[in-house]
Image (cartoon, grey):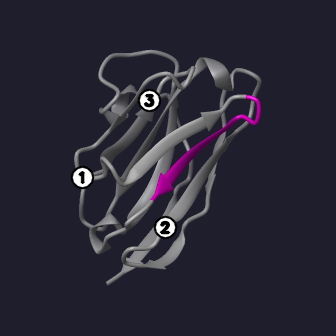
Amino acid sequence: QVQLVESGGGLVQAGGSLRLSCAASGRTFSTYAMGWFRQAPGKEREFVAFISWSGGSTDYADSVKGRFTISRDNRENTAYLQMNSLKAEDTAVYYCAARYSGSNYMYAVSYDYWGQGTQVTVSS
C-alpha cells in the first residue's frame, strides 16, 4: 500500500515556475514507477510525465517537453515535477500516481495509487 500526497501548487504568472512534490508513505517507494497527470476543468485526465523506479528512464507529454522535468529521491520517498515557462494552458489539478508494473505508462488506468491532487493556476 502506498499513500501519495502532492504539494507545491499555487497561482503563478505565465512564464513563471513551480515545483510540485509528491510524498509517498511506505518503505517500497523505490519499487514503484511514478507518473504525473493533470486534469483541467471539463477535460479528461492527461499524462504529463513518467519516471521509472530507478529514475533512469523518463518521458514527457509533447505539450510539456523541454519545460517540465520529473525527478525522484528514493531516500526521501518523494517525486518531483519542476515546471518552468508555465503557460495558461498548464492550468489544471495535478496528480501524482504510482505503479508497480504494467504496460503503457501514459494510461491513467495502469497506475495503482493516486494522490489527492494539487491545483496549479497560471495567469496570462
Which of the two labelled residues, at mark 2 and mark 3, occupies the earlier sequence position?
Answer: 2
| For the residues bearing labels 1 and 3, Cβ distance under 8 angstroms | no
Q: Which mark is residue 17?
A: 2
Give the answer, above or below, for where 45 lies relative to 110. Answer: below
Q: Residue 74: percent from the left, percent from the top?
A: 69, 29
Give the answer, above or below, for where 61 lies relative to 90. Answer: above
Q: Quadrant of the N terminus?
A: top right
Which of the two labelled residues, at mark 2 and mark 1, occupies the earlier sequence position?
Answer: 2
Q: Residue 105: percent from the left, percent from the top?
A: 35, 27
Q: Cα distance, mark 1 to mark 3?
A: 21 Å
Q: Which residue is mark 3?
A: 111
Give the answer, above or below, for where 88 lies relative to 52. Answer: below
Residue at 50 percent across and 78 percent down: it is 11
Give the answer, above or below, for where 48 lies relative to 112. Answer: below
Residue at 66 percent across and 31 percent down: it is 2
Chain part drawn in magenta: 75-83
Please state which of the two labelled residues, at mark 1 or mark 3, is closer to the viewer. Answer: 1
Q: Is residue 81 magenta?
A: yes
Residue at 47 percent across and 78 percent down: it is 12
- Kind of residue at disc 1: Ser
Please state which of the two labelled residues, at mark 2 or mark 3, is closer to the viewer. Answer: 2
Q: Quadrant of the C terminus?
A: bottom left
Q: Which residue is mark 1?
A: 63
Quick one: 74 or 34, which is closer to the camera?
Answer: 74
